[in-house]
Image (cartoon, rainbow, N blue to C red):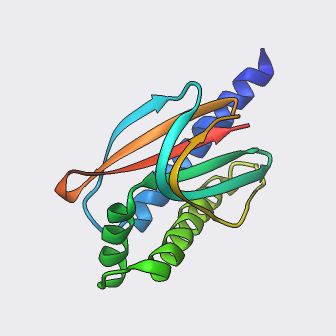
Amino acid sequence: MEKVLQDKEKMNLLLKGVQTSIGQLIPMNHELVGRTELEGSFLVRYGVFIGFSGDIAGKLFIGGDRSLFSLLGKSMFGMDLEGEMLTSFSGELGNMIAGGSVSAIEGKGMEVDITSPTILDGHSFISGYTKGYILTYNLPDNIELLVHVLID
């Protein structure tokens, strides 16, 4: 039973780290409107996938559609991003959010590394995790940012 509590504590720390990182990085109005436990596989259209290793093994998927990442790029850099620049920005945004999440929990006695980003474009199903949550953020113009936090 103790391991389950430790895993829950790790998941809660990681979720708080993700929320802290997003709060520091997204330079536009955004509101966390949901934290939903995941079961089974889920469908993604577009986004960035980053792995965690070390004291927490899992994945972070930041998703939505291209318009979401374009909006975030414009808010951060003041210009529209398309094509390869949008793809590159999407990967870097994933790096920044995952890196900020890991930094936020480092002082809690855990060591966690992140992998290089992988861009998913098209309809893909994600499965193969032990525990997962979706953090749903509302952005301007009724655009949703979905952040999937998955533990292996």
In which quadrant of the rendered image does the N terminus lie?
Answer: top right
**Quarter of the image that includes the C terminus:** top right
Q: Is residue 69 placed above or below 123 in the rendered structure?
A: below
**Residue at point 70%, 29% (across, down):** 130
Q: In the image, what residue occupies the spot 49% across and 75% down?
A: 89
Query: Residue 131: x, y in percent?
Result: 64, 30
Q: Which residue is painted at 44% across and 30% down in the image?
A: 36
Q: Is residue 87 left or right of residue 128?
A: left
- Residue 60, relative to residue 24: is it above or below? above
Expressed as whole percent of the image width and height from the top left, the position of residue 125 reads 57, 40
Residue depicted at x 32% and y 64%: 67
Foreground pick, 21 / 132: 132
In this view, the residue in front, 78 or 19, is 78
Q: Which residue is most to the left? A: 141
Q: Provide residue 87's location: percent of width, then percent of height.
A: 50, 73
Quadrant in the picture for residue 12: top right
Total marks drawn? 0
The reply, left or right, for residue 23 in relation to residue 30 is right
